[in-house]
């Protein structure tokens, strides 16, 4: 295992060192972890037996719950299509588009919890 940043072996809400997606930066001029920036819930870094370094991004989807509302347009008014479409259209896009119903499907959270039955 190798430290990801600041001598830490696990980085939470990891956004990376660069603004790879060209997301709008706040007035403070700083990118922040968590809300308002695309991030991985966590990441770890290690060196393989062949000497190459590899990073693993971690998502906690099974511990979160979501609504059925599209997230295409952020509360701030940002249209996320402008952020993600260029990456989606690249030849080396990591998504298997054959398994994805449409580009718009990306803007819905993957799991929605059922509402509890309130009938007593």
Image: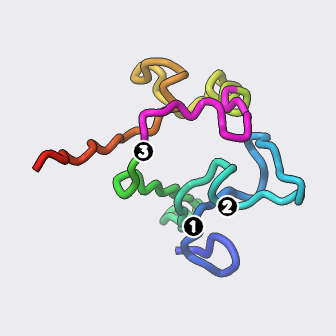
In the displayed structure, 109 sits above or below 26; it is above
Q: Which residue is mark 3?
A: 66
Query: Are circles 3 and 2 on residues that touch, CB within 8 Å?
Result: no
Spot occupied by residue 26 in the image (x, y as percentages of width and height): 83, 52
Spot occupied by residue 98 in the image (x, y as percentages of width and height): 43, 19
Residue in view at x 75 percent, y 44 percent:
20
Numbered range of the magenta stretch: 67-81
Residue lying at the far bottom of the rendered structure: 7
Q: Earlier in the sequence, mark 1 or mark 2?
A: 1
Q: Main secondary structure of the magenta part?
A: loop
Q: Earlier in the sequence, mark 3 or mark 2?
A: 2
Spot occupied by residue 60 in the image (x, y as percentages of width and height): 42, 56
Query: Are circles 1 and 2 on residues that touch, CB within 8 Å?
Result: yes
Q: Earlier in the sequence, mark 3 or mark 1?
A: 1
Callout 2 secondary element: loop
Callout 3 secondary element: loop
Q: Nearer the viewer, mark 3 or mark 1?
A: 3
- Give the distance between the C-alpha atoms of the residues marked 1 and 2, in whole angstroms: 8 Å
Q: Which residue is mark 2?
A: 33
Residue in view at x 64 percent, y 48 percent:
38
**How packed is label 1: few (under 14 Cα within 10 Å), some, or many (20 or more)?**
some
Asked whether residue 18 is drawn in magenta, I would say no
């Amino acid at each position: 295992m190798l430290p990801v940043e600041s001598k830490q072996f696990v980085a939470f809400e990891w956004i990376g060192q660069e603004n790879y997606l060209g997301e709008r930066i706040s007035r403070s001029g700083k990118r922040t972890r968590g809300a308002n920036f695309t991030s991985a819930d966590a990441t770890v870094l290690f060196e393989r037996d062949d000497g190459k370094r590899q990073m693993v991004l971690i998502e906690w989807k099974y511990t979160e719950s979501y609504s059925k509302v599209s997230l295409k347009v952020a509360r701030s008014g940002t249209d996320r299509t402008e952020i993600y479409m260029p990456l989606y259209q690249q030849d080396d896009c990591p998504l298997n588009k054959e398994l994805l119903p449409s580009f718009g499907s990306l803007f819905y959270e993957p799991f929605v919890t059922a509402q509890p039955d309130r009938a007593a």
